[in-house]
């Protein structure tokens, strides 16, 4: 289980080769903490106080009690994102002995859980709490206000969540202010890196108290992955080279849920019913019927061609598509789209047994044909900034991975995703 979860640390937005060429390219893609003393290479590169420079043998022991100071003292240092005139120290909390030397606020070096927060980060936090959170859930059905109230609160005591919220806010600003894209992508990259590093440090300590925090961190990591946009050669569940990156995230979430599902989906994370989701409207019923007709034709092909031990995997996967389409169309009929469709759309992948997922990774033709019809559902999520371009990207990857003899079978998904004229 922990193999999948710990592999989350391999995700690093630097070196991203996005389909959108306006995004900057960096020198390296994967970057892990090398734990060098007195400061690790990553922290030196990012000009951040390194945890290892303050760690002690006691603090490294999982059995040692963690320090829980009642208050933090803050000092200010220079931000690499912006230059502002230095002003007199502000008092944070009730301590008056803060040391202001420039514009970036950092927890005191005596606090082993210190994390820096600059005015640029405060801008991101403000943007998250006033704008980004609205793009992540339906306020009308989020009665507990998880995305606005609880996640920012959790982020104060669980650094991974805070970093990942700021990464999402930075990517949202990329979408809104493309002229500042390079600046915001760099900020998103930094927060993503340290958000992942923070959660991997506690994965082996998953318990009833922190399982919701770790689960939501994994969800946020996946959202950041989507929000950064399609990456050349990576098609969610298969890749041009090696293991598919996003599948590592999905398997990590699956491992967390398999261990603590009941505790995770309790309290404020308990699923809420939506009485407005009832049926498919007559306007959308004809459209849904067309999809189901083409899926039936695909099923006939699979019935004729699938043999051996994989036959049942293909049959079960294609049989599950009409139900998933109907769930999505019920949501659309109720005016739900974008990120609201995520549980249904990604749920189809999530529920596939591992042997079928492996066939997708291996780019087995019949598995890719089934995936092509699933990718139609991504189109209905592109009303959210997080998923723009993913439908076209995945279907292009499928086309480039299939032999000529199978291409006629993806004409319907291509026509829906990329209509001519």
Image (cartoon, rainbow, N blue to C red):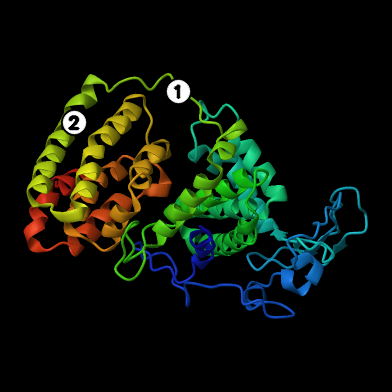
320 or 92, nearer to the observer: 320
Give the image location of residue 24, x and y in percent. 45, 69
Question: In percent of the image, x 19 and y 63: which residue is there?
Answer: 400
Q: Secondary structure at mark 2?
A: helix
Residue extending farthest right = 96
Residue 305's place in the image compared with 46, above or below, is above
Q: Is residue 153 visible?
A: yes
Q: Secondary structure at mark 1?
A: loop
Can residue 50 be seen at all in this image of the molecule? no
Image quarter of residue 239: bottom left
Specify the label residue 42 is tagged with.
none
Indicate the position of residue 352 as horizontal and vertical percent values. 33, 47
Disc 2 from disc 1: Cα separation: 23 Å
Identify whether 82 is placed above or below 260. below
Residue 287: assigned label: 2
User: Around disc 1, counting alpha carbons within 10 Å, would you say few (fewer than 14), some (14 to 19), or many (20 or more)?
Assistant: few
Q: Earlier in the sequence, mark 2 or mark 1?
A: 1
Total labels: the figure holds 2
Q: Is residue 15 left or right of residue 92?
A: left
Q: Nearer the viewer, residue 408 or 314?
A: 314
In the shown orientation, is residue 270 left or right of residue 108?
left
- Would you name the residue on which mark 1 appears? 274
Q: Quadrant of residue 128?
A: top right
Q: Nearer the viewer, mark 2 or mark 1?
A: 1
In percent of the image, x 29 and y 35: which residue is there?
324
**Farthest residue in the bottom direction?**
37
């Amino acid at each position: 289980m922990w193999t999948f979860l710990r592999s989350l640390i391999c995700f690093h937005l630097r070196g991203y080769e996005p389909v959108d060429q306006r995004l900057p390219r960096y020198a390296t893609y994967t970057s892990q903490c090398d734990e060098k003393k007195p400061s690790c290479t990553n922290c030196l590169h990012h000009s951040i106080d390194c945890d290892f420079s303050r760690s002690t043998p006691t603090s490294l022991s999982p059995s040692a009690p963690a320090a829980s100071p009642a208050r933090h003292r803050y000092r200010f240092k220079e931000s690499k994102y912006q230059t502002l005139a230095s002003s007199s120290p502000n008092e944070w909390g009730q301590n008056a002995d803060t040391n202001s030397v420039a514009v970036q606020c950092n927890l005191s070096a005596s606090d082993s859980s210190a994390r820096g927060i600059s005015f640029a980060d405060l801008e991101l936090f403000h943007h998250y709490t006033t704008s980004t959170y609205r793009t992540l859930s339906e306020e009308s059905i989020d009665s507990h206000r998880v995305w606005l109230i609880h996640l920012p609160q959790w982020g104060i005591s669980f650094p991974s969540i805070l970093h990942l919220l700021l990464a999402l806010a930075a990517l949202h600003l990329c979408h809104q202010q493309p002229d500042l894209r390079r600046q915001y992508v760099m900020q998103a990259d930094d927060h993503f890196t340290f958000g992942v590093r923070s959660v991997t440090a506690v994965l082996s300590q998953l318990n009833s108290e922190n399982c919701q925090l770790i689960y939501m961190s994994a969800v946020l990591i996946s959202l950041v992955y989507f929000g950064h946009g399609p990456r050349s050669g990576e098609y969610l569940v298969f890749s041009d080279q090696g293991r598919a990156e996003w599948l590592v995230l999905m398997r990590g979430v699956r491992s967390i849920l398999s261990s603590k599902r009941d505790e995770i989906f309790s309290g404020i994370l308990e699923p809420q019913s939506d009485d407005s989701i009832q049926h498919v409207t007559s306007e959308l019923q004809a459209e849904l019927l067309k999809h189901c007709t083409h899926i039936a034709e695909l099923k006939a092909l699979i019935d004729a061609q699938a043999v051996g031990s994989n036959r049942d995997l293909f049959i079960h996967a294609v049989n599950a598509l009409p139900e998933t389409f109907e769930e999505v169309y019920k949501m659309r009929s109720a005016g739900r789209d974008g990120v609201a469709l995520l549980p249904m759309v990604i749920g189809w992948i999530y529920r596939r047994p591992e042997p079928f997922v492996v066939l997708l990774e291996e780019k087995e033709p019949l598995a890719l044909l089934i995936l092509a019809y699933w990718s139609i559902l991504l189109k209905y999520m592109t009303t959210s900034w997080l998923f723009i371009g993913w439908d076209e990207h995945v279907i292009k990857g499928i086309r480039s991975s299939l032999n000529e003899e199978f291409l006629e079978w993806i004409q319907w998904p291509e026509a829906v995703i990329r209509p001519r004229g």
